[in-house]
């Protein structure tokens, strides 16, 4: 590999690393303190019916949520299915609480 090619690859790696370092934390616009009571009010009742323990859906070995985007999508899906009528900001609060409590996704 030529020196110019190696320098180009290195420049891409450095640029990509800088972009990652500048990314905000997942759910940075959400407030976990506002999301917690919403989870207690609406999410846990459904999860108790499914698993008996509302925390089990988040802690089970075969959980489906692996990324912040998947968590946002799942919260939106549940909001629609349960017809809770949460606004997108409230969904972000819920996702922020779930991330803080269970998932711990990093930027």
Image: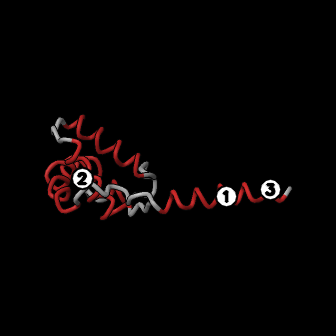
Q: Position of residue 61 (x, y in %)?
A: 45, 58
Quarter in which the N terminus is drawn: bottom right
Residue 9, placed above or below residue 72: below
Q: Position of residue 48 (x, y in %)?
A: 23, 52
Report the disc number at residue 94. Answer: 2
How many neighbours does mark 3 have within 10 angstroms: few (below 14), some (14-19), or many (20 or more)?
few
Residue labelled with disc 3:
4
**What whole-number distance in Å separates the C-alpha atoms at marks 3 and 1?**
10 Å
Q: Is residue 28 left or right of residue 7?
A: left
**Which circle, 3 or 2, is nearer the viewer?**
3
Q: Residue 37's quadrant in the figure? A: bottom left
2 or 34: nearer the viewer: 2
Q: Position of residue 72 (x, y in %)?
A: 34, 46
The residue at the point 26 percent across, 59 percent down is 97
Residue labelled with disc 1:
11
Quarter in which the C terminus is drawn: bottom left
Mark 1 and mark 2 lie on one chain; the one further toward the N terminus is: 1
Q: Secondary structure at mark 3?
A: helix
Q: Is residue 82 left or right of residue 28?
A: left
Q: Position of residue 104 (x, y in %)?
A: 38, 63
How many neighbours does mark 1 have within 10 angstroms: few (below 14), some (14-19), or many (20 or more)?
few
């Amino acid at each position: 590999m030529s020196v110019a090619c190696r320098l180009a690859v290195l420049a891409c790696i450095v640029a990509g690393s800088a972009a990652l370092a500048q990314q905000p934390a997942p759910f940075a616009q959400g407030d976990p303190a506002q999301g917690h009571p919403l989870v207690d009010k609406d999410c846990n009742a459904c999860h108790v019916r499914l698993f008996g323990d509302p925390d089990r859906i988040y802690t089970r070995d075969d959980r489906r949520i692996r990324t912040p985007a998947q968590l946002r999508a799942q919260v939106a899906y549940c909001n629609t299915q349960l017809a809770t009528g949460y606004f997108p900001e409230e969904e972000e609060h819920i996702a922020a609480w779930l991330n803080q409590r269970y998932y711990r996704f990093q930027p």
